[in-house]
Image: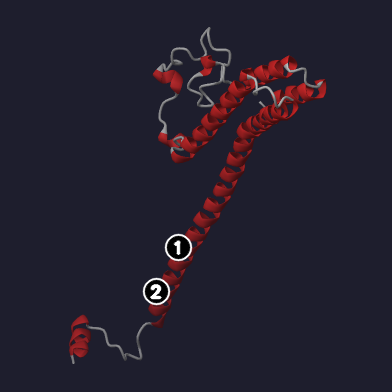
Amino acid sequence: MSWFKSMSVSGEDVFDETGDELNLQSKEWTSNMKKRIKDGYVEGVDAGEEASLQAGFNQGFREGVAQTAAVGRLKGIVSAISCWCQIERPENPVPASVTDLLQLVTQHEDRVVDSIKRALENPPPSVSDVSESMEDLEVEAGPGCGGEECKETDCCQRAETDCSSGSGLSLLLQRCVDVATELRLPQELIAHMQELKSFQ
């Protein structure tokens, strides 16, 4: 009985045969259009997110490979040199220059991987989040980076914190060539090491 009271209060007759069907069709049309607009918006957002995620993945993959491929190959070469020393000269310990170089390459590799992890954990702000440029803020490079004692001008961009320690990839490659020359290893191996410079 309560539904009857509510209908009589609103003044509309549910069973009115002379009711305005055009008004009902207009309401249905409006409802359908709102639903379609909402559905189209949701589909557009989903498609945009998917395209953006794929582009971001592709870029991140390229950058990750570029940063890790040369270091991984260099580590493999230095490990092979260490094994060669153990096999060819079992009576002598592996030269300190080889073990030190392997340790430096491993540390460099760890720094590269850590910088990639940090970049994933703390992605850079989007353009819309940044209101002023670095020049407007008059930000300068930190001490020791890009200065006279620094051989690499983009070490800050690659998140290397100690560029003056001689652990940059180009310096590690040069040390590896020096070790190979010291051990009188074949020129083909040294040429292969030189090819790694093109990965930088």
Q: Secondary structure at mark 1?
A: helix
Q: Quadrant of the N terminus?
A: bottom left
Please identify the quarter of the rendering in which residue 22 is found.
Answer: bottom left
Give amino acid for label 1: Lys
Instruction: Give the camera-side residue of 161 and 37.
Output: 161
Closer-to-camera residue (85/69): 85
Q: Which mark is residue 38?
A: 1
Q: Residue at x 55, y 47 (%)?
A: 52
- Amino acid at the residue labelled 2: Lys
If you read the primary sequence from the N terminus, does the residue marked by circle 2 or circle 1 appear first?
A: 2
Quarter of the image where one finds residue 34 = bottom left
The numbered mark at residue 82 is none
Percent position of residue 77, x then y: 70, 29
Q: Residue furthest top?
A: 148
Proximity of marks 2 and 1: CB atoms separated by less than 8 Å: no
Disc tally is 2
Q: Which element is circle 2 on?
A: helix
Q: Quadrant of the C terminus?
A: top right
Could you say where residue 17 lies in the image, as x and y percent from the top left? Answer: 35, 91
Residue nearer the viewer, 91 or 186 = 91
**Callout 2: 10 Å neighbours few (<14), some, many (20+)?**
few
Which residue lies at the image location 35% right of the left edge and 89% below the top edge?
18
124 vs 195, nearest the viewer: 195
Report the mark closest to the observer, 2 or 1.
Answer: 1
On screen, residue 64 above or below 12: above
Q: Is residue 125 above or below residue 160?
A: below
Tell whether 44 sits left or right of 85: left
Q: Residue 75: where, in percent of width, then height? A: 64, 30
Left or right position of 157 against 83: left
Q: Which residue is mark 2?
A: 27
